[in-house]
Image (cartoon, rainbow, N blue to C red):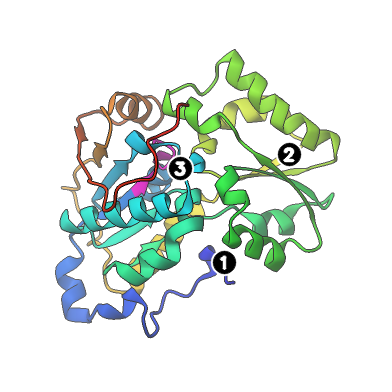
Amino acid sequence: MASELDAPVNGSAGDPLTAFTASSANGMAARPVGIFDSGLGGLSVLRAVRAQLPDEALVYVADSRYAPYGERDHAFIVERTLAIGEWLILQGAKALVVACNTATAESIALARERLTIPVIGVEPGIKPAAIQSKTRVAGVLATQVTLRSERFRALMERHGADCRFLCQPGHGLVEAIERCDVDSEQVRALLASYIEPMLAAGADTLVLGCTHYPFFDAVIRDIVGDRVMLIDTSVAIARQLERVLGANGLLAAAGTNSVPPPRLCSTNDGAHLLQLASRLLGLGGPVERVDIALRETPAHEPRAA
């Protein structure tokens, strides 16, 4: 399976990219890019997209009512990805970034088939980790759903054959970010319990396999020092978005001085979204609470964090 970040930007039969002609694309270039995550982690991707594409208007949706996706089943994750994608299209989105490793692993193929705009996903940086590791031992922190997905297994088979990967589910980490806890003693202890066995096994590279995890960057660096290289693919995702928009004539005009701040939306009350966006990205409010209905009745309500 081709890597998300290596995927060609030209469309093919059945690919939503082929639905765009030059004339239709020109009229859509001023529209926003939609970005969504199960919660707050996708703000790390939003940060990278703003830096890479400062002329693009952005709409961010945190599906915090149903976070974390790592505790959900396949059908539920697919349903939420499609529902939020369709909602963003109704808001005028010209492209969709699924800024959630779990949602990408479970639903990206169907999203590309069903949605009428280009869809960009995220995935753990297995390829760069395998390239950069000198000890040939690398750690991976990701959600349980991501680690057991077919997409992740395909990445490992394609890029990780000559490297030993130590895969650790990051239980409790998404929930910590969702409550804006990036550096408490409890979080430090939890991260240390996950990372120190990797160091003992000789890992010199650590893949941050969830978009929530880059917000632990400072704490992780305190734990690993200069012994480990951290792999965060958010910048690569922003560059891939730029390639996709450019290939379809959807890039916003350069030098626009009237780009609005990102529109921040949450399916919960939005207080934590505003807090994290302000603290880590320097973004002020408001945060809109939006009701994005379930397309089907879920099999269960959210589990307690």
Q: Are marks 2 and 1 in contact (CB under 8 Å)?
A: no
Query: Which one is earlier in the sequence, the residue at label 3 or at label 2?
Result: 3
Q: Residue at x 31, y 69 (%)?
A: 114
Q: Residue at x 53, y 43 (%)?
A: 210
On residue 3, the disc is 1
Residue 213 lies in what quarter of the image? Answer: top right
Which portion, as a residue range, is magenta? 36-44
Q: Position of residue 118 (x, y in %)?
A: 33, 67
Which mark is nearer the camera, 1 or 3?
3
Q: Residue at x 50, y 25 (%)?
A: 176
What secondary structure is marked by label 1?
loop
Q: Position of residue 84 (x, y in %)?
A: 28, 51
| Residue located beneath label 2 in the image | 228
Q: Position of residue 267 (x, y in %)?
A: 27, 37
Q: Amino acid at mark 1?
A: Ser
Query: Which one is earlier in the sequence, the residue at label 2 or at label 1?
Result: 1
Query: Which one is earlier in the sequence, the residue at label 1 or at label 3?
Result: 1
Q: CA distance from mark 3 to mark 2?
A: 28 Å
**Is 120 covered by the magenta stretch?**
no
What secondary structure is marked by label 3?
helix
Between residue 251 and residue 256, name the one nearer to us: 251
Q: Amino acid at mark 2?
A: Val
Between residue 221 and residue 164, name the one nearer to us: 164
